[in-house]
Amino acid sequence: MKTSILKKENVVFAMMKGYSFRISDIKWQLDINNCVYPYKVADKMPGSMRVGYLNTLAYFSSEYSAGYVKNINCIFSQWLRLMDLEMINSKAVYQFNVSLGPEKNYNLNSLKNFLSKWKKLGYEGVDNSALRMLEKITIKPNLTGEAVKRRDPNSGPLTEEELKIILESIRKLLKEDKIPLFIYCYVILLATTGRRPLQLTSLKAKDLIRTEEGCFLNIPKVKQRKNFRSEFSLVSIDDSLYEKLTTLVNMNQKHIEDSVSQSMDHIKNELPIFMNTKKSLLIHSDESLDTIMTTDFLHMNTYFISNKLSNLTTKFNIRLSSNNDHIRLNARRFRYTLGTRLAKEGASVEVIAKALDHKSINSSGIYIKNCPDNVHDIDKMLNPFFEPLSKIFLGEEQLKNKNLFTEYVLNSFGFSNGKDDQIECFTCKNFRAWSSQ
């Protein structure tokens, strides 16, 4: 988007198709899940800075994901609560970095990108010293997987018992017609694919694939600068889940056909799998369904389905037998669980990254590092080294254990006992032999 366009009161089109706003609007709706209130931030700025902030944020709204833009607005809101910004300079950036601390320092990455574009667009409010300071500051990556490291019982991976209780409970609840089909399918998909809520709510009927090789689901990737449903990853699903998802699509089709009194057969493949049924009532008979289906208009809001999931265990009294507490549920716990289970089964970092749809392997190593079985293996490997050494210090069978320890060390370096004269250490001028006493 050109700067000249931003300066006018023209309509700004958000990155998500079907959403637009004017810069003067109090609320910018950027997609089905995200809206920003830029004036809550901009009104705390001087006039010239306000113009630069609003126009740069509008640019980002057309080029980046709604979640990314919302995060930038939140960062500036936090910054302005901390201090008055007459000019964004090196001092302001330095003080903000100090306030963030090492754990939230990663927010400066988004800020750096935003301020650089602000400057390039030619608006006032950003001093060159601010950009130089951002170059000097060491920005640490976001610390992911802390709940996995701690094996947090409330936000970390689910235990085998918890997962079993959840899956058995939702099957029973569905059979008794106590939960809708979309909740059941959502939980099963979280457990089997480990995908994020936005990836699942972006699914359409055409993503369900059945071939001679089996049943598959083409799941959209979610990235900052990618258009809605532009990249996908194929995952295998079982026949039972395929049939239930197909049933869900058929239910959605009937619901819309009843609302608009026209057939949906020609665009059935474009129907969302997880649909906001209330939105179908807002479709007017003269509106083109073909156009609506290319947007996220009918897709379920992620906050809505996430709330349904988090309230599931309290609503239906799903408890852990060991302490009788309700099991806390969210999509991230299922994601952590899948990664942890794969690590426990011996999967490599690359396999875990692919299974969880990570962009790189950087975040996947935490599952392998945290696997309790690895601790057991490490103990098993080190035991021949530490056991005789500890017994030597305790005075137990010193000669026997000394020989065991010496043999272990020599064997570790490819030497066998009795060939000490071939070890280069013994001819080194700095070598000091252990006392034989």
Image (cartoon, grey):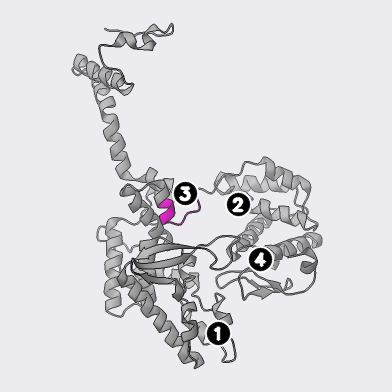
**Quadrant into which the C terminus falls:** top left
**260 or 238, nearer to the observer:** 238
Residue that numbered label 4 is attached to = 61
What element does badge 3 sit on? loop
Please check the rendered image and state whether residue 356 is part of the magenta-colored stretch, yes or no: yes
**Quadrant into which the N terminus falls:** bottom right
Q: Is residue 311 visible?
A: no
**8 or 207, nearer to the observer:** 207
What element does badge 1 sit on? helix
Mark 4, other Cα within 10 Å: few <14 / some 14–19 / many ≥20: many
Where is residue 151 shown, x and y percent of the image? Answer: 37, 50
**Residue at figure coordinates x 55%, y 66% from the top left:** 230
The stretch of residues the image draws in magenta is 352-363
Q: Are marks 4 and 3 in contact (CB under 8 Å)?
A: no
Q: Amino acid at mark 4?
A: Ser
Distance from label 2 to label 3 (Cα)? 17 Å
Q: Are marks 1 and 3 in contact (CB under 8 Å)?
A: no
> Which SS does the magenta portion mostly show?
loop
Mark 2 vs mark 1: which is more N-terminal?
2
Labelled disc at residue 363: 3
Q: Is residue 371 visible?
A: yes
In the picture, measured across the screen, residue 264 lies left or right of residue 396, that is right
Distance from label 1 to label 4 (Cα)? 25 Å
Mark 2 vs mark 4: which is more N-terminal?
4
Mark 2, other Cα within 10 Å: few <14 / some 14–19 / many ≥20: some
Residue that numbered label 2 is attached to = 107
Q: Amino acid at mark 3?
A: Ser
Position above or below: 229 against 356: below
